[in-house]
C-alpha cells in the first residue's frame, strides 16, 4: 500500500467519522459499521459519497490541505450518499445522475463556504441539505419528495440497536464525557417529545439533533470547557426547538428538516458564544488556571505575575535623541555599561532619556490592571510581580512584592560599586558628571531599560527570582524581545506553567503547555480572585497541595 493510497483511505474514513463530529479513522470505521447495521444500502451510499467528496477535494480547492486530511471534503457528500441509499436498494444505479447530484453538492459547498466565511460560520451539513432540497424541487413531481427512504436493517430492532451502539462507541472514543452528556440530553428529549405521534420529532429530535448539537459544541468548537457545555446546551435546545417548530408548523410537508435544525442550532450557539466567551469563567483554560494557582499556593510556591511596560511612553522618551519624532531618520541610541563607563556623551544622552521618562512617570496614573494586580497580590495569590514597567505604576497602586526587571527610574546607581542613591535635585546632571561618593564611579539612573542586550548578571538575577515559580501569569500583550523570551523560556524549562492573560494581539504565540485567558487582565484577575476564594474553602486532603518537583 503506497503512502498516497494509505492517506486517501485514512482521509476517507475521517470523512465518515465527521458524520458524528469525530475525526479518527477508527471512529469512521465504527460509524460505517453502525450505518451498515442500521441500513446497509445507506452505508453503501455513505461510502460512495465520501469517496467522491474526498477525491473531488483534491482538485476543487474548497478545503485547505489540513481540512482535506481531516475528512471535511467527504462529509456533505457522504450525507447525500446516505439519502441515495434508497435508490441503491431498488436497483436504480443511475451513476451519471448520482455523480451529477454529488457534483451539485460540491458546488453548493463551495458557494456556501464563501458566503458563510463573511460571518465566520462553518458550512456544517447545509450543503447536503440544500442539495437534497434543490434536487427534490427540480426533479420530483409537485407536492412529492424525490428521495426514497432506504430499507432498514434485515436484523430488525437488534440491528438498529447494535448500529447505534457502534456510533455511540465512535463518539465515546472521541470524547467520553461529552458522549455521556449527549446521551442524557437525547434521552431527556425522547421523554419530552418521543411519546407524541409526530414521527419527525421522534426520530430527529431525540435521536439526532439534540445529542449531536451538544456533542459538536463540546468536542469541536469549544472543546473541554464550561463554554462548550453552555454552548452545547444552547445548540441542543435551539436544534430541538427548530425541529419541533419545523415539524409542527407544516413546513415538513414541503420538505423534511433533515439536518437543517442541527446546523441552524449550532450556528445560533456559535453566534451566542462569541458574545459570551469573552467572560473568563466560560473559557477552556480558566478553571485549569485557578486550580494551578490554588495548588501552587498550597504547595508553598505562590504564583508569580509578569507585567510588561508602557512601550509607547518609552518610545516617547527616546524622541529627543533621534530627530524629535518616531518616524525620524535617526536611530535610538544604544546603551551598555561599557559605553556608559567610557563615554561622557553616552552618559549625558542616557540622563536625557531617563529624565524625560521620570517626568512622564510623575504624571502617569496607575491603570486598572495595576490596581487589580496589586489587589491580587495583597490577597496572597501571587508571591512576586516581575515588572518591566519602570514608571512605578504598580507601587503607586499599592503592590509591594515588585521585582523591577529594569530597575527604578527614580533612583541612581553607581556603574562601579552598584550603590544606590536618590535622584539629585534640579537638573544638576546637566552641568556636571555625577560621581559616587564611595568609589568615584559614574552615577546614572538605575535602569537597564535602554540597554542593547541582556547581561549575564541580568540573566542570573532573573533566574534567582524564578527559581521556585510554579505558575507565571503574563498580563497584557508583550513585545517580543530577549528579556521576555528569556523569562518565558526559563519558566517552561523548570516545569512551571505559563498563563497568557490578554485581550490584545500579542507577538508571543502560546507554547505547547501554556494556558490562555482571552480577557483584559483586570477582568480575568477579578474572576480568578472570586474562584480562588471559593477554592480556599475546599479542605486540602493532601492531593491539592502536591506539585511536581522542578529541576534548575
Image: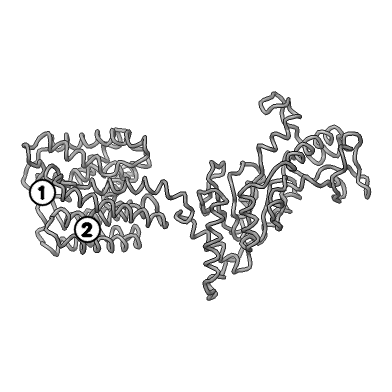
Which of the two marks, 2 or 1, is nearer to us in this view? 2
Residue 122, image quadrant: top left
Seen in the image, is 439 located left or right of residue 185?
right
Which numbered disc covers residue 149? Answer: 1
- Depth check, front residue: 483 or 134: 134
Is the residue marked by circle 2 packed among few (<14), some (14-19), or many (20+) residues within 10 Å?
many
Q: Give the x, y percent position of residue 153.
A: 11, 57
- Residue 6 seen in the current view: no
Residue at the (20%, 52%) spot, across then down? 244
| Whole-number angstrom distance, CA of label 2 to CA of label 1 | 20 Å
- Residue 347 can be seen, yes or no: yes
Q: Looking at the picture, how far across and down is residue 112, in whole percent?
A: 29, 35
Q: Are marks 2 and 1 in contact (CB under 8 Å)?
A: no
Q: Is residue 179 left or right of residue 496?
A: left
Q: Residue furthest bottom?
A: 541
Residue marked by disc 2: 206
Amino acid at each position: 500500500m503506497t503512502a498516497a493510497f494509505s492517506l486517501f483511505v485514512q482521509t476517507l474514513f475521517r470523512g465518515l467519522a465527521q458524520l458524528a463530529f469525530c475525526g479518527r479513522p477508527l471512529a469512521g470505521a465504527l460509524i460505517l459499521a453502525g450505518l451498515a447495521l442500521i441500513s446497509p444500502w445507506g452505508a453503501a451510499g455513505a461510502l460512495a459519497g465520501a469517496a467522491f467528496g474526498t477525491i473531488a477535494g483534491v482538485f476543487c480547492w474548497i478545503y485547505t490541505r489540513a481540512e482535506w486530511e481531516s475528512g471535511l471534503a467527504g462529509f456533505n457528500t457522504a450525507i447525500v450518499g446516505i439519502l441515495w441509499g434508497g435508490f441503491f436498494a431498488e436497483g436504480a444505479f443511475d451513476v451519471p445522475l448520482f455523480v451529477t447530484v454529488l457534483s451539485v453538492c460540491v458546488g453548493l459547498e463551495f458557494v456556501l463556504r464563501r458566503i458563510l466565511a463573511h460571518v465566520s460560520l462553518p458550512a456544517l451539513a447545509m450543503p447536503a441539505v440544500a442539495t437534497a432540497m434543490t434536487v427534490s424541487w427540480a426533479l420530483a413531481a409537485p407536492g412529492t419528495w424525490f428521495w426514497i427512504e432506504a430499507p432498514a436493517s434485515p436484523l430488525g430492532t437488534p440491528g438498529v440497536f447494535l448500529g447505534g451502539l457502534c456510533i455511540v462507541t465512535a463518539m465515546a472514543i472521541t470524547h467520553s464525557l461529552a458522549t455521556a452528556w449527549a446521551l442524557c440530553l437525547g434521552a431527556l428529549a425522547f421523554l419530552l417529545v418521543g411519546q407524541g405521534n409526530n414521527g419527525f420529532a421522534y426520530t430527529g429530535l431525540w435521536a439526532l439533533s439534540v445529542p449531536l448539537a451538544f456533542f459538536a459544541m463540546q468536542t469541536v468548537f469549544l472543546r473541554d470547557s464550561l463554554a462548550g457545555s453552555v454552548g452545547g446546551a444552547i445548540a441542543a435546545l435551539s436544534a430541538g426547538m427548530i425541529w419541533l417548530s419545523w415539524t409542527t408548523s407544516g413546513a415538513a410537508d414541503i420538505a423534511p428538516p433533515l439536518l437543517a435544525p442541527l446546523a441552524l442550532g449550532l450556528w445560533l450557539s456559535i453566534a451566542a458564544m462569541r458574545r459570551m466567551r469573552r467572560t473568563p469563567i466560560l473559557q477552556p483554560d480558566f478553571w485549569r488556571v485557578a486550580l494551578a494557582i490554588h495548588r501552587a499556593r498550597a504547595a508553598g510556591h505562590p504564583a508569580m505575575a509578569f507585567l510588561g511596560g508602557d512601550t509607547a511612553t518609552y518610545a516617547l522618551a527616546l524622541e529627543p535623541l533621534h530627530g524629535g519624532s518616531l518616524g525620524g531618520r535617526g536611530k535610538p541610541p544604544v546603551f551598555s555599561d561599557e559605553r556608559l563607563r567610557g563615554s561622557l556623551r553616552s552618559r549625558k544622552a542616557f540622563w536625557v532619556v531617563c529624565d524625560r521618562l521620570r517626568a512622564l512617570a510623575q504624571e502617569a496614573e496607575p491603570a486598572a490592571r495595576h490596581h487589580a494586580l496589586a489587589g491580587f497580590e495583597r490577597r496572597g495569590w501571587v508571591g512576586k510581580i516581575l515588572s518591566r514597567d519602570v514608571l512605578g505604576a504598580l507601587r503607586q497602586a499599592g503592590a509591594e512584592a515588585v521585582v523591577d526587571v529594569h530597575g527604578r527610574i527614580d533612583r541612581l546607581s553607581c556603574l562601579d560599586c552598584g550603590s544606590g542613591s536618590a535622584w539629585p535635585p534640579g537638573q544638576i546632571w546637566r552641568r556636571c558628571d555625577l560621581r559616587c561618593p564611595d568609589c568615584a564611579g559614574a552615577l546614572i539612573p538605575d535602569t537597564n531599560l535602554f540597554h542593547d542586550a541582556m547581561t549575564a548578571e541580568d540573566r542570573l538575577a532573573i533566574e534567582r527570582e524564578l527559581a521556585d515559580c510554579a505558575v507565571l501569569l503574563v498580563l497584557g500583550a508583550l513585545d517580543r524581545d530577549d528579556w521576555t523570551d528569556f523569562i518565558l523560556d526559563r519558566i517552561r524549562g523548570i516545569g512551571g506553567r505559563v498563563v497568557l492573560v490578554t485581550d490584545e494581539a500579542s507577538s508571543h504565540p502560546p507554547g505547547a503547555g501554556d494556558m490562555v485567558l482571552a480577557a483584559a487582565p483586570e477582568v480575568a484577575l477579578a474572576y480568578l480572585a472570586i474562584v480562588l476564594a471559593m477554592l480556599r474553602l475546599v479542605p486540602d486532603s493532601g492531593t491539592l497541595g502536591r506539585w511536581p518537583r522542578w529541576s534548575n
